[in-house]
Image (cartoon, rainbow, N blue to C red):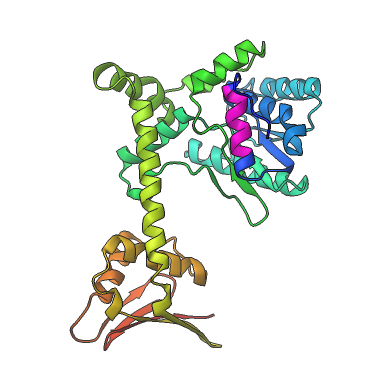
Amino acid sequence: MPSFPSDPVLNAVHARLRQWNVRGPLLVAVSGGADSLALLRCCQLLQDHLGLIVHAAHFDHRLRAESHLDSDWVQARCRQWNIPVHCGCRDAASRDTHIEEDARHDRYDFLKQTAREQHCAWLATGHTANDQAETVLHHVLRGTGLAGLSGMPESRPLSPEVQLVRPLLDVPRETLQQWLQTQHIDWRDDPSNQNESLTRNWLRHRLLPMVRDRINPRVDTALHQLASHARDSQIAINWAADQLQSHVTFEDSEHASTMTIDCAPLRNVPSSILTAFFTQLWINAEWPRQRMSTKHWQALTQLVQHTGHPTGHSLPGSIQAEWYRGQLTLRRLTE
């Protein structure tokens, strides 16, 4: 197995891609910034080692008058490295006031479509350890639970055909910039990254520097470690929740989908595990979760722990929950 001990960045990317068994066509999202450019170059250098066929994808949000220059620059760099590049764009005039959210949605729609068109089962993005720290802090400030504290996952399904991977999630941004300098590779700095009216930029340029100066100079590492610990805890909770599936029976009919849960063995199970248990039931049954709030999940756990008279709740998605004689019945009417 090849390794690159004198090149920590290349070694980190190689280890992650090998861990996930990434091979064949791989689409790399490239903005032109240091992070994504370092990832693209590493993937290109690892093509023969891992059996990769690297493609690049660049999306122009058109939030700046000169943003097309980034696209031109990325295309020129890809031609220099002999990497196929696919570009897309969107007119900012068709976007509403939620700039950050809309931009992310547009970008990932383009990346999913490009991955499908190029038969890429893998999409790699250049998110770094700093991005992870900023994400966790953002979630904390908005209010979050354990899942939010976990930050961005290293890998997750982006669609049924495409797996998203983040090989640089443990690598600091500064390390990548130093690596590019040693490789004599320049990059593009997006001026919009200095716009502090955008929440992520304000966290990066204002709040985090203050925290480093006044409280903890290693706050980025602390937040990154918090995400790792939260993720490990979530994995443990999900594992415990999976052990409860044997207490559920399923029945489908022409007019309804029904789950019946034997509550007695679950009565003393901690609420956090029960919530994960119900969430998994919803996922397995492909029931809608968008409108399920903390209040709804709590109502379900209380029904499991119920010992009195029959009771029930109406839940989003035309789902009815009813407790009777130690059994909880969840029934969703089919259209």
Q: Between residues 87 and 147, which one lies in front from this camera angle?
A: 147
Residue 90 pos. (x, y %): 65, 37
As for residue 13 lying within the magenta part, the answer is yes
> Residue at coordinates 35% horizontally, 50% vertically from top-left?
233
Quadrant position of residue 24? top right
Q: Between residues 272 and 69, which one lies in front from this camera angle?
A: 272
As for residue 315 lying within the magenta part, the answer is no
Locate the N terminus by quadrant: top right
Residue 192 pos. (x, y %): 52, 22
> Residue at coordinates 47% horizontally, 41% vertically from top-left?
152
> Residue at coordinates 70% horizontally, 25% vertically from top-left?
71
Residue 253 horizontal side relative to residue 260, left or right: right
Q: Between residues 21 and 130, which one lies in front from this camera angle?
A: 21
Classified by dominant secondary structure, the portion drawn in magenta counts as helix
Residue interval drawn in magenta: 8-17
* Extreme residue in the front direction: 1
Residue 215 horizontal side relative to residue 105, left or right: left
Location of residue 53 with respect to 244 vertically, above or below: above
